[in-house]
Amino acid sequence: MNNVSSDRGLGYMKIEEYKAQGGRVPKAEVSSKPLGFLKITSEPSDASIWTSQNDENWQFVGYTPFEKSLPLNSSHWIAECYKIKKEGYKDKKECRPVNRGNRLLHFNLEKNDSKKTD
């Protein structure tokens, strides 16, 4: 598993932020264990992972396969787009809405056309 030590670019919402936006978190859900994880895989693996909240200003966060637990003081993943890149393959992108629990993404990458037209 490849990881980058910084949380920059990985979107999660702290419980306090979620509550401030009108969300309700039952006391049973505030625990000492992570409430979910993010897992990003690709075929082939070792593709770079980029994230963005607005489909602009992409930030590199690591390589596939990638796994990160939801921080303990957080209850939801924010809405976020993920872009996967690997040399010789077409980029793939997927955007996800705010969600609770686990966020699982798998990307099947397609090879670039090596044929050139004259």
Image (spheres, rainbow, N blue to C red):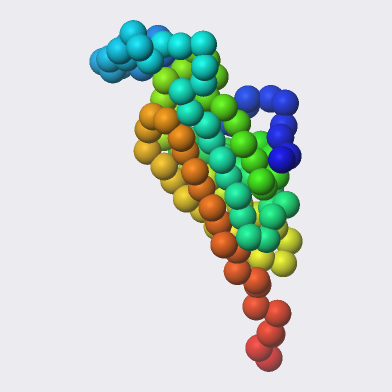
- Viewer-nearest residue: 12 or 42: 42
Residue depicted at x 46% and y 35%: 102
Residue depicted at x 72% and y 32%: 4
Q: Residue furthest bottom?
A: 118
| Quadrant (top left/top right/bottom left/bottom right) for the C terminus | bottom right
- Viewer-nearest residue: 69 or 86: 69
* Residue 17 visible (yes or no): no
Q: Is residue 56 above or below residue 5?
A: below
Residue depicted at x 39% and y 29%: 100
Q: Position of residue 92 (x, y in %)?
A: 55, 57
Q: Position of residue 63 (x, y in %)?
A: 70, 45
Q: Position of residue 38 (x, y in %)?
A: 54, 36
| Quadrant (top left/top right/bottom left/bottom right) for the N terminus | top right
Is 72 left, or right, of 61 in this rendering? left
* Residue 34 visible (yes or no): yes
Residue depicted at x 48% and y 28%: 36
Q: Is residue 37 above or below residue 17?
A: below
Is 89 left, or right, of 69 in this rendering? right
- Viewer-nearest residue: 35 or 4: 35
